[in-house]
Amino acid sequence: MTISDWTREAIEAYLPEGNEPRRFGAAAAGRSGRSDISERIEEILRGEWDR
């Protein structure tokens, strides 16, 4: 049995049965809603540095 298998079994035994999958609450917490951040990173950092 691998560590992954053992961990998966332990988690399944711990969680109540029949529930919907849990959502990770912090997922997308830092999402800005903009799609061009990686393209503008130099501009953004320059603006932050000059403050």
Image: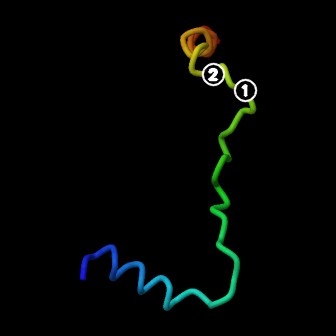
Q: At 60% across and 9% down in the image, what residue appears?
A: 43
Q: Are marks 1 and 2 in contact (CB under 8 Å)?
A: yes
- Label 1 and label 2: CA atoms lie apart by 6 Å
> How many badges with numbers are in the image?
2
Q: At 68% across and 25% down in the image, what residue appears?
A: 35
Residue 23 coordinates in the image, percent (x, y): 66, 65
Disc 2 element:
helix
Residue 3 coordinates in the image, percent (x, y): 28, 76
Q: Amino acid at mark 2?
A: Ile
Q: Residues within 10 Å of mark 2 (few under 14, many from 20)?
A: few
Q: Please tell me which residue lies in front, 50 or 6.
A: 6
Quadrant position of residue 17: bottom right
Quadrant housing the N terminus: bottom left
Q: Which mark is residue 11?
A: none
Q: Please tell me which residue lies in front, 29 or 19.
A: 19
Q: At 49% across and 91% down in the image, what residue appears?
A: 13
Q: Amino acid at mark 1?
A: Arg
Residue 37 against residue 14 in the figure, above or below: above
Residue at the outermost left position: 1
Residue wearing tag 2:
37
Quadrant housing the C terminus: top right
Q: At 72% across and 26% down in the image, what residue appears?
A: 34
Q: Residues within 10 Å of mark 1 (few under 14, many from 20)?
A: few
Residue 47 coordinates in the image, percent (x, y): 63, 10
Residue 22 coordinates in the image, percent (x, y): 65, 71
Disc 1 element:
loop
Residue 3 against residue 48 in the figure, above or below: below
Residue wearing tag 1:
34
